[in-house]
Image (cartoon, coloured by chain):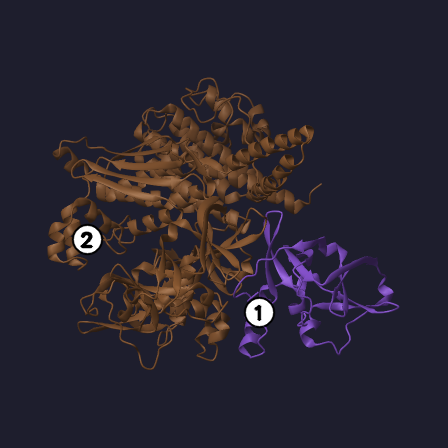
């Protein structure tokens, strides 16, 4: 027998899974109901869902949830028996319930218990709504629900209600009361089984007679997948023997193992696949909320929701899709009046589709809105001085479209909660590229916009190039490689030059900085001299493009990337490891990490070594987008937009602690919060407890989010790259730029990240770090 | 209690058998550039990539044997599987509490934290190693500290 804790854990996990399923289903039902208020089956479904939720919360002892679900269920009961007309006020109240319930469930998942909280306001609203009818309802029935709590209980009993639509004949037997306790447990399952006879059954979600899927933990699956790939390798080693020994029995046994292994491998890979509807489920509700906020009418059409892709990729496409859909509603679909004027139906239409195509998954989001305003992009690009007016005149539509992927580029003049922060499409693109996918935009003015994502089927296997450095082989992800070349440095035109301390070479009239892998990895101190022939892989990191000098280029191969031990995460150069055909381990290089660790990113941001540099050095006019913000004590701080993935405002109540470290749950990650004010010279430490919410810049490092807490966001604006060095150096600052009369301090994120990771190295610099740690 | 015994230079050591998963010979280790000296590299254990700890470096001993045919004691250290690379694995022996003593005070400080105590056998001493102390993230921090202090045992070894 397992101990009580484990049993509790198991019940809780079961409960959370079930509750989330119910919540997702509720979201869909509400949207369905709002679209067609007469849809009786939806009313029934919502009622039952609330009831199930109440039942299982009660069983698990979650009183808050039970009370909420109870109130919502009572209200729905009234709607169901026809004594209350469904209004959007009711929908809003019930959706608030769904949101609160979702938060509570989330908290249960994190903290293993129900968080305390007061929902009386919401419950009052629900009760007020359900009582409203008692006074003014159309049929003026006796207000049973509020008259007596006992009778109220009865009105909720689903089995009875189902056969007693008028709500009076239900009070026939006392047995119902006694059965209720039992029924509640049974409801756990029973509610999802064939519905009561009189229910119109328009719902295809609960298929009868199918075998319930089994839940298997990710860990077990990953282990199995690991073993399977080992099995494949073992099989590979076995195969040559059957050719060596001319024994037909042996050969047939080996062939058998071969076939079984192959099938095993295919089936195992299939376990990683899940339908994309997993991600889409939440969209109807989201769309409803956004369009309501913006006063637009939008219908969502879905096609191909059964298309399967790798589970890890599902997570990776979720945020980009949310972003694209938000954009479509906000920028694409017009207000109803405008649409009617343009001769379109008042209700806009957003179509989501997914399909398999030549080994990739194609996901499309198209709207029938106004389309992209190319002239606005042109004007904005000119405004931001990204192009000159001569260039502006010649750019065609597809070239203009590229601008929407630039960090900080937004044509929206007003920042709303929906979009317009300029932190959008560039992140969509980064995230999609990160998983080896691509994005394509098509737009026709007046007719709409279509965005197409092409995603590989699985992340588990990715193509990589093997290179040799000293005696070891290293893998580089193929999508980071731009080109491979041999540079004969004895040729004068191909010499390595020293450019302000950075070795560079000339590639088609551009200066490209070089990193020597063997030096970078600390394997040798020699720098190749001019006169040698160098093998160079030109790589694109998220910051810059650089040439990596390696000893030899080997073959291209599909690899399975596995994580390295957590203790080695501080070595930025490696993204993971992979197992070669002979069973040996090879390390996978992290292109971004190499660029960061070599300090090249920092150097390239200094004005003297801009790789795209024109023959004459950049002048004040050369600008890059920066986010301006403040911390207590320092008004004008800036950071390069490209370092920031997202801006968030987090309520302080979401903060949790791991030891002395403040963290928040952020998507699937636990995001540490870094209080920037503690790392910058001259700032007063921002005290979280004085704040209601925190302004946070989300920075991804090695695929993990870090939240940089600032005082306030101010602006996104192009700022000159001409950095004035500070003398003496100020901790946390890279330098300053002058913008008119105003001096803007640019923070040094990589130094701050170093301070954060290795505080001991900076002790003695100042005591501010101590202050943070002791907090 | 049962111990898996092994040798490091002239020392005879043991690890509680309950911590040991298996003993493997003929490992192929992939070194990790820039890792601390105690990390000999990573190895493939049936599809799982695990750390190979250089026990010589962990005890700050000179490694005499440069052979590539390595022996690893696979053990579970803080729920993590690691391979402790040693010179040679000896017998499994069963010992009684009677012969157990706390570590002598003249042991070097650096290895003291690794050692639970010694068993006095008739002909030699068996040093009992705490498997849970073989690898920890703090090992990394310590070595960084030592590196800074100029004691410098890390970051140099890697050229094979």
**Image spot of residue B110 (x, y percent):** 67, 74
Q: Tell me how far mark 1 sits from mark 2, CA to CA.
A: 57 Å
Residue A506 seen in render: yes
Q: Are marks 1 and 2 in contact (CB under 8 Å)?
A: no
Quarter of the image for residue A277 reads top left
Would you call the spot at circle 1 few (<14 residues within 10 Å), some (14-19), or many (20 or more)?
some
Judge by depth and name the residue closer to the eye, A526 or A196. Answer: A526
The answer to whether residue A655 is seen in the rendering is no
Disc number at residue A413?
2
The circle drawn on residue B157 is 1
User: Given the image, what chain letter belongs to the residue carrying mark 2?
Assistant: A
For discs 1 and 2, the disc positioned in front in the rendered view: 1
Furthest residue in direction top, as rendered: A197
Q: Position of residue B107 (x, y in %)?
A: 73, 76
Which residue is at the far bottom? A728
Q: Quadrant of the N terminus of chain B?
A: bottom right
Element carrying mark 2:
loop
The C terminus of chain B - image quarter:
bottom right
Q: Colour of chain A?
A: brown
Identify which residue, A11 or A489, lies in the foreground: A489
Give the purple chain's letter.
Answer: B
Q: Name the image quarter holding residue A303.
A: top left
Instruction: Please say if A202 is above or below A365.
Output: above
Is residue B77 left or right of A647 when viewed as pictured? right
């Amino acid at each position: 027998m397992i101990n009580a804790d484990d049993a509790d854990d198991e019940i809780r996990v079961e409960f959370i899974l079930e509750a989330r399923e119910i919540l997702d289903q509720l979201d869909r039902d509400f949207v369905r109901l709002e679209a067609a208020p007469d849809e009786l089956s939806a009313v029934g479904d919502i009622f039952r869902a609330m009831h199930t939720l109440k039942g299982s919360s009660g069983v698990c002892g979650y009183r808050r949830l039970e009370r909420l679900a109870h109130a919502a269920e009572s209200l729905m009961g009234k709607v169901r028996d026809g004594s209350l007309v469904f209004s959007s006020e009711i929908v809003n109240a019930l959706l608030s319930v769904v949101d609160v319930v979702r938060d509570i469930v989330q908290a249960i998942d994190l903290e293993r218990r129900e968080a305390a909280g007061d929902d009386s306001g919401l419950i009052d609203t629900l009760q007020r709504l359900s009582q409203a009818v008692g006074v003014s309802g159309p049929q003026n029935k006796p207000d049973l629900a509020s008259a007596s709590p006992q009778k109220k209980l009865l009105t909720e009993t689903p089995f009875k209600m189902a056969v007693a639509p008028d709500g009076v004949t239900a009070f026939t037997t006392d047995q119902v009361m006694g059965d209720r306790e039992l029924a509640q447990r049974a409801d756990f399952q029973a509610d999802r089984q064939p519905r009561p006879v009189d229910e119109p059954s328009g719902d295809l979600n609960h298929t009868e007679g199918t075998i319930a899927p089994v839940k298997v933990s990710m860990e077990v699956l990953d282990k199995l997948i690991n073993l399977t790939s080992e099995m494949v390798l073992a099989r590979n080693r076995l195969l040559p023997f059957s050719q060596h020994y001319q024994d037909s029995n042996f050969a047939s046994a080996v062939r058998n193992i071969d076939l079984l292994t192959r099938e095993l491998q295919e089936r195992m890979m299939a376990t990683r696949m899940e339908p994309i509807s997993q991600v889409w489920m939440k969209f109807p509700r989201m769309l409803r909320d956004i369009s309501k906020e913006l006063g637009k009418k939008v219908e969502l059409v879905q096609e191909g929701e059964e298309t399967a892709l790798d589970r890890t990729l599902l997570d990776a496409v979720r945020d980009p899709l949310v972003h694209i859909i938000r954009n479509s509603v906000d920028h694409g679909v017009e207000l109803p009046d405008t649409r009617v004027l343009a001769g379109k139906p008042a209700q806009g239409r957003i179509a989501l589709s997914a399909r398999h195509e030549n080994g990739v998954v194609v996901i499309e989001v198209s709207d029938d809105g106004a389309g992209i305003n190319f002239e606005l992009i042109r004007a904005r690009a000119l405004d931001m001085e990204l192009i000159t007016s001569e260039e502006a005149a010649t750019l065609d539509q597809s070239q203009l479209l590229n601008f929407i992927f630039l960090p900080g580029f937004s044509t929206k003049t007003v920042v709303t909660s929906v979009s317009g922060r300029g932190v959008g499409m560039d992140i969509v693109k980064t995230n999609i590229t990160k998983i080896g996918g691509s994005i394509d935009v098509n737009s026709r003015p007046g007719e709409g916009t279509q965005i197409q994502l092409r995603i590989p089927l699985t992340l588990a296997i990715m193509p990589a190039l093997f290179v040799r450095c000293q005696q070891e082989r290293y893998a580089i992800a193929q999508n980071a490689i731009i080109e491979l070349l041999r540079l004969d440095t004895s040729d004068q035109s191909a010499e390595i030059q020293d450019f302000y301390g950075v070795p560079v070479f000339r590639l088609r009239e551009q200066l490209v900085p070089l990193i020597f892998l063997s030096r970078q990895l600390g394997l040798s101190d020699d720098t190749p001299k001019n006169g040698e022939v160098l093998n160079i892989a030109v790589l694109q990191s998220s910051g810059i493009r650089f040439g990596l000098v390696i000893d030899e280029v080997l073959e291209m191969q599909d690899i399975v990337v596995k994580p390295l031990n957590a203790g080695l995460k501080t070595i930025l150069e490696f993204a993971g490891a992979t197992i070669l055909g002979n069973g040996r381990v090879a390390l996978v290089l992290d292109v971004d990490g190499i660029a960061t660790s070599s300090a090249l990113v920092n150097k390239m941001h200094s004005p003297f070594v801009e790789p795209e540099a024109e023959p004459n050095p950049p002048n004040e006019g050369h600008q890059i987008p920066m986010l301006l913000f403040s911390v207590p004590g320092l008004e004008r701080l800036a950071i390069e937009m490209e370092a920031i993935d997202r801006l968030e405002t987090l309520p302080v109540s979401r903060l949790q602690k791991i030891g002395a470290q403040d963290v928040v749950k952020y998507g699937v990650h636990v995001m540490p919060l870094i209080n920037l004010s503690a790392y910058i010279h001259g700032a007063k430490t921002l005290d979280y407890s004085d704040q209601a919410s925190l302004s946070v810049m989300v920075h991804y490092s090695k695929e993990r989010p870090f939240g940089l807490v600032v005082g306030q966001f101010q602006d996104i604006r192009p700022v000159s790259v001409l950095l004035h060095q500070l003398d003496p150096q100020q901790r946390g600052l890279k330098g300053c730029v002058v913008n008119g009369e105003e001096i803007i301090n640019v923070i040094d994120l990589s130094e701050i990240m170093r301070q954060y990771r290795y505080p001991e190295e900076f002790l003695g610099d100042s005591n501010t770090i101590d202050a943070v740690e002791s907090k | 209690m049962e111990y898996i015994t092994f040798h490091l230079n002239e020392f005879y050591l043991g690890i509680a058998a309950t911590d040991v998963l298996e003993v493997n010979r003929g490992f192929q280790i992939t070194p990790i550039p820039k890792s601390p000296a105690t990390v000999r590299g990573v190895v493939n254990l049936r599809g799982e990539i695990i750390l190979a700890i250089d026990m010589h470096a962990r005890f700050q001993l000179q490694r005499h044997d440069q052979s590539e045919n390595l022996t690893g004691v696979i053990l579970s250290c803080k729920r993590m599987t690691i391979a402790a690379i040693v010179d040679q694995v000896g017998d499994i022996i069963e010992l009684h509490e009677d012969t157990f003593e706390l570590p002598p005070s003249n042991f070097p400080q650096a290895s003291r934290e690794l050692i639970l105590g010694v068993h006095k056998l008739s002909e030699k001493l068996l040093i009992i190693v705490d498997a849970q102390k073989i690898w920890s993230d703090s090992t990394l921090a310590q070595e960084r500290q030592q590196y800074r202090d100029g004691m410098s045992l890390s970051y140099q070894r890697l050229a094979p």
